[in-house]
Image (cartoon, grey):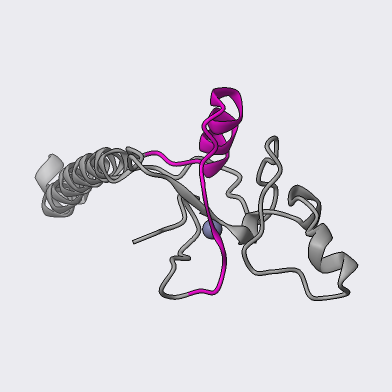
Amino acid sequence: MSVCAVATCKNNKKNSNFIFHRFPHELSIRNKWISLCKRGDRLAKTLYMCSQHFVDSDYTRDLENELLNMEPRKKRFLKGDAVPSQHLPLQKIRSNDEAKVGRKIRYTRKENQEIVNNVLKSMQTMALFFYPFLTNKNYAK
Ligand SMILES: [Zn+2]
């Protein structure tokens, strides 16, 4: 099934009426598209991008239909150098693996904080236990 490769885009052929464009073969443009997807994980072999990420001027003009004063056809062709510009993520979306590492670090930090808290608590308990002896003047004599 054709799924949009943009990291934050949930469009696919089933849930939307967008056109799905295959990634260009021209490497320099293809790489631009890929970097704009901001994917942190592996890319599928066949990549598609939905038409939500393009503007009208990215498409070749449908001269035939324009001359006939008809609506542009749904099947539209991107210009060879068209680069997506709309609804794109600003930051790279972390892959699942990276997210897992992040969680593990946070978990360890939380564990360490718990140890510190426990030590502080037991020190407090000890202080409360010894406090009467330390303040008792009779005892100090
Ligand atoms: Zn999309």
Magenta-tinted stretch: 16-40
Q: Is residue 85 magenta?
A: no
Q: How many marks?
A: 0
Residue drawn at x 61%, y 30% as measured from the top left = 29
* Left or right of 57 on screen, residue 6: left
Q: Quadrant holding ligand 1?
A: bottom right
* Left or right of 90 on screen, residue 48: left
Residue drawn at x 14%, y 53% as measured from the top left = 125
In this rendering, the answer to whether 63 lies above or below 40 is below
- Residue 78: x, y in percent? 67, 48
- Residue 69: x, y in percent? 88, 74
Image quadrant occupied by the C terminus: top left
Residue drawn at x 58%, y 39% as measured from the top left = 36
Looking at the picture, tell me which residue is in the foreground, 81 or 141. 81
Looking at the picture, tell me which residue is in the foreground, 13 or 126. 13
Image quadrant occupied by the N terminus: bottom left
Looking at the picture, tell me which residue is in the foreground, 114 or 133. 114
- Residue 136: x, y in percent? 17, 51
